[in-house]
């Protein structure tokens, strides 16, 4: 079945990096932040609390580091552009929903070709990070709600939706979708998903929907 709505996670799914970990490197705290990220993605920590704790460690970082980090470190996952642009060309709505940050997610969504994006907003004052993130946080429940709301707004039955992610905070979204796929995922999500991609790139999701290679919109 060809799905009419695609909802995708960003970090370690549509891009190959965890943005907050890379950003922390610009203030010398990557190892500390990455350890919390890994535990949160395994489902061992409350996502919102873990995000608040990690963002607090970025306090004082100049905001220009965000754009520098994105340009120097963030790379789109193989197959992401083809997946999103092909589905969009055939009438699907595409939504990037991230527990990361708008300053990364907005440009990434535009580069890949998403129609819509939702993500967290970093606090900035005096051109420096405040160590705070705007509330409410885009957490696991917010991701699920984004999928359900986007489908309802377009009269798309949930069975005709596709969600893809990699971490424990994607589980509710993955379970709500008609087809929920774990991409190179942590065990908790892999166990909850309808399907998993462990070796191939994201174009595997086009094959799963019955798209012929001649129908792909490639870079």
Image: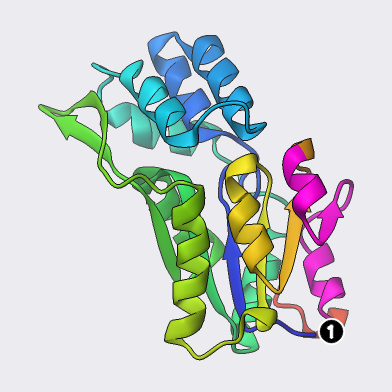
Question: Is any part of residue 191 visible from this angle?
Answer: yes
Badge 1 marks a residue whose secondary structure is helix
Look at the image and say whether residue 217 sits in the magenta stretch: no
Give, as a single range, the part of the protein colored magenta. 188-209
**Up-down relation of residue 68 to residue 34 (above or below):** below
Q: Is residue 209 left or right of residue 73?
A: right
**Up-down relation of residue 16 to residue 171 (above or below):** above
Question: Which quadrant: the C terminus?
Answer: bottom right
Residue lying at 51% horizontally and 72% vertically, measured from the top left: 148
Residue lying furthest left: 126
Q: Which residue is mark 1?
A: 214
Question: Which quadrant: the N terminus?
Answer: bottom right
Residue lying at 63% horizontally and 70% vertically, measured from the top left: 84
Residue lying at 52% horizontally and 68% vertically, measured from the top left: 147
Instruction: Judge the density around disc 1: few (<14), some (14-19), many (≥20) Cα neighbours within 10 Å.
Output: few
Q: Is residue 164 left or right of residue 209?
A: left
Which image quadrant is residue 110 in? bottom left
Q: Nearer the viewer, residue 169 or 198?
A: 169
């Amino acid at each position: 079945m060809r799905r009419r709505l695609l909802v995708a996670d960003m970090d370690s799914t549509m891009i190959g990096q965890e943005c907050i970990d890379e950003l922390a490197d610009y203030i010398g705290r990557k190892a500390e932040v990455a350890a919390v990220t890994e535990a949160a993605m395994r489902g061992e920590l409350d996502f919102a609390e873990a995000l608040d704790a990690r963002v607090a460690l970025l306090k004082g970082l100049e905001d220009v580091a965000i754009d520098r980090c994105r340009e120097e470190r963030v790379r789109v996952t193989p197959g992401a552009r083809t997946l999103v642009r092909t589905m969009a060309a055939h009438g699907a709505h595409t939504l990037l929903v991230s527990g990361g940050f708008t300053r990364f997610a907005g440009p990434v969504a535009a580069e890949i070709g998403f129609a819509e994006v939702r993500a967290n907003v970093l606090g900035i004052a005096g051109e420096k990070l405040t160590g705070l993130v705007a509330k409410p946080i885009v957490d696991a429940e917010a991701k699920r709600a984004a999928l359900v709301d986007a489908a309802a707004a377009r009269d798309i039955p949930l069975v005709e939706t596709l969600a893809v992610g990699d971490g424990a905070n994607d589980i509710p979204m993955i379970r709500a979708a008609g087809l929920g796929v774990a991409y190179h995922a942590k065990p908790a999500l892999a166990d909850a998903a309808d399907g998993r991609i462990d070796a191939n790139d994201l174009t595997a999701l086009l094959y799963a929907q019955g798209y012929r290679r001649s129908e792909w919109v490639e870079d």
